[in-house]
Image: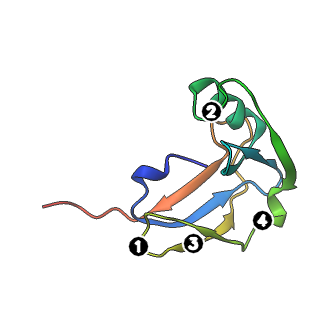
Amino acid sequence: MSNEKCRYGQTNCFIGTGIKYGVFAIGDNEASVCTYRAARNMAFQGIITPRGEINQLLEIDGSKMVGTKIKAPFAINPEVYVLPMDNVLATKVRSAFRHEMIHPRY
């Protein structure tokens, strides 16, 4: 849903309950849950291979994902929960928001 390499303090993920999300093939062995718009953007940025090709594996309503545990590989907790947020829009880049704890570095 967003750039995982910088998500160290992730505590949960917010999604739009009225938005349709898709599961898109990212490569041979990976998939990502996002909107079609986000998948299209990733395809032309070279994140999805082959570049420019979009392969949607399935479609799911955002409301059906609420409460689901998802993997957060670089977070303090290895799993976080999907939570509803009504003001998430499908016209935004990723259409999902990850909440992160910010720890100041001294």
How far apart marks 1 and 3 lie (CA) works out to 10 Å
Q: Which residue is mark 1?
A: 76
Classify residue 74 by image quadrant.
bottom left
The residue at the far front in this view is 28
Mark with earlier residue (2, 4): 2
Q: Which residue is mark 2?
A: 42
Q: Amino acid at mark 2?
A: Met
Mark with earlier residue (1, 2): 2
Give neighbour class at mark 4: few <14, some 14-19, many 20+ (Cα, 10 Å). some
Q: Amino acid at mark 4?
A: Met
How far apart marks 1 and 2 lie (CA) works out to 27 Å
Find residue 102 and report its horizontal and vertical position in percent. Answer: 34, 62
Q: Which residue is mark 3?
A: 80
* Contact? badges 2 and 4 (CB < 8 Å): no
Q: Amino acid at mark 3?
A: Val
Query: How many dots with numbers?
Result: 4
Give neighbour class at mark 2: few <14, some 14-19, many 20+ (Cα, 10 Å). many
How far apart marks 3 and 4 lie (CA) works out to 12 Å
* Contact? badges 2 and 3 (CB < 8 Å): no
Mark with earlier residue (4, 1): 4
How far apart marks 2 and 4 lie (CA) works out to 22 Å
Q: Which residue is mark 4?
A: 65
**29 versus 27 height, above or below:** below
Label 2 secondary element: helix
